[in-house]
Image (cartoon, grey):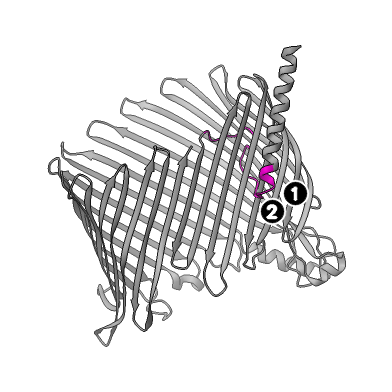
Amino acid sequence: MNKVNQKKNRIQTAVIKIFLILFFLFSNIFSQTRVDSLEYLGRFFNQNLLNSIFDKQLNTFHLINQLQIVKNYDDLTIRLNENFNSTFIRSDSKNTRDEQTLNLIAKFKINKNVFLGISGNSSLLSDNRSLGINESAVNSASFFSEWEVMPYLRLNPFGGYSSNRQIGITDNGFLYGLEGLLNNLSVSDLLINSDFRFKNEDVLPRRNLTRYFALSVNNSFEKGIANNIRTYYSQTRKDFYFNSDPITSAEFNINKNIQSRTETSYQLFDRLSYYEFLDLFSLDLAGGISWRSIDRDIKYKTAELQTNSLYDTKIDEIKLEFGAVARYSSKIFNGSLRVSFDERDEKHSVKRFENISEQLYEQKTELEEQKNNNSNRVTVALNGDMKISQNDFLTLSLYQSKLVYDTKSLLNDDDRDELLSIIRLRYLRNINSYFSVFVNTEYTHTHIVYIFASRSSNNKKNRILRLRTGGEYIGKNLSSFNSFEVSANYTVYDFEDITSNYQSYSFRQFTAIDSTTITITERLRLFTFGYLKLSEVGDFSWNSFSTKPTRTLKEIYLEPRFILNYLRSNFSIGLRLFILDTYSHKLAEKQLESEYLSIGPIASVEVSIWNRINMIVRGYYEFITNTNVPDKEQASLIMQLNWKF
């Protein structure tokens, strides 16, 4: 009897703790339900931490907070996760947006196979802008039981109550469902994993639903050969309020209408893998098919509104994917070849409803059919790393893709072909243990061709060439990284001779970057970072390969800082300088158009305490001078706190 009474007392104590925690949290915080595939049986954090970031850049302020707490008291486990994001934009309208989410789960161990628990979820969204949904609050509490039916199978039925507020209307109702998790079930040579979720949230007159099922079957035929089959089903429904038009409001006596969005997805995917094929190769073959449909349904519709924009639509999408990856590995060369093909077909349609006129139905059907499209893409990618010698390395990368985009409606002229080619080459040489140099080159070619003459004026070729070289030195008291890059971007329209709306242009740029650290003493360093950018924009002729400059920019950035290391903390102070000069070209003369100068102090502090608390404060103050604009001063600041407790 004493053992029975002790068990009852432990259960009573656990229940009291759970309700006290819920009462305290929900009396102070309102937030939102986390959207996961599994909410009760999913993966959970196991570390206590607090992260807080405040960032102020120009007229935009950001505040991001995250709190995670997990506590174990004998047979009681409590997990809490809260996220708060706030953005404030200081302008004439002063825009503010706040988002907060809170998730709490507490469960008590009845025996080694059964847990009982309570869960609380809430959300808050507040935005002072006039958006479709700029204010919402969702709060729910539920009881659940976690039952380990077998070592590889867990079930979790749950039920509770939800309060859902949206654009000023609060709906209450019951939520209920079941989750399941099948983990590493071994049957013959098969390894099976699965998880599913069924959830209803009846906040009438709205309903939110979740249906989710995933299955993975892995089969290892023999050493080095494996096959994995995955299948997936998902359905979610969300109901939203929106303002009703006067005619619909009068006919149905409503102020707000309801739109339901139901998305249903299916997927079947298979991957066959060969490892250590001929001792040097490995091969992956994969293919899959997926379906998706999106139904948008309006609850209250009237045929009296002949210009009716309230009509139900449906989107059906099917996608095929195939791919193969071959890898080669040896002492001097590692490489891979990837080939893939995917095709997607998307169809839009209108749902007919009672009393809608045939003329209006055909108009809406025609509008939706203009969105129908079919696309297919083929890609080939080659990557290789070659060890030429003990100190010389060469990396080669090739990428080629072609996209064919077709539309089915005669009223849509967006049909096009897109070709993309990228080649990269990198050479690295280690001169000695202190110094290394590199050379990178990259070429990108893009060609877009519209099929119909009505859009052919947009046909263009884009060529980008980059050449970059530099080196890195790492010594005892000096380390430095330097790079120099020239790049040229040429965009040429195919039919610029017969249209004046599009003119070929070029963008060329030179960039020099330096990052150097000098060790003055054991604790004191001088760090400098700076770059120079010279840019030119101009009208371009590909036939004569000549450019007529129209705009030139000179950009200089310099940041020298002294850094002091003391007791596992860093303190730095320095100067920040930014210059941007803009020039225009008129009558073959280069004229200064504007000068922008920003200069001021910069400082940062990074403090570490007990390997658990890390605090960072960075900021700079600017004295800004700009042509034809009054001088001004402004501050930028970022503060971050990370606490693992």
* Place of residue 528 in the rendered image (x, y in percent of width and height, measured from the top left): 23, 57
**Extreme residue in the bottom direction:** 587
Q: Position of residue 10 (x, y in %)?
A: 70, 23
Q: Residue furthest top?
A: 1
- Decide if residue 171 is on the left or right side of residue 151: right
From the viewer's perspective, is residue 84 above or below residue 487? above
- Residue 278 drawn above or below residue 434: above
Which residue occupies 52% across, 67% down? Answer: 89
- Helix, strand or loop for disc 1: strand
- Determine which of the numbered discs, if any, sits on residue 163 in the image: 1
Query: Residue 63 location in percent, x, y?
Result: 51, 56
Residue 362: give its label.
none
Q: Which residues are magenta?
A: 24-46
Asked which secondary structure carries label 2, the reply is strand
Residue 291 in the image: above or below residue 457: above
Give yes or no for residue 35 being in the magenta stretch: yes
Label placed on residue 137: 2
- CA distance for labels 1 and 2: 8 Å
Q: Position of residue 119 (x, y in %)?
A: 68, 37
Are the residues flagged by discs 1 and 2 in contact, CB closer than 8 Å?
yes
Tag 1: amino acid = Ser
Quadrant position of the N terminus in the picture: top right
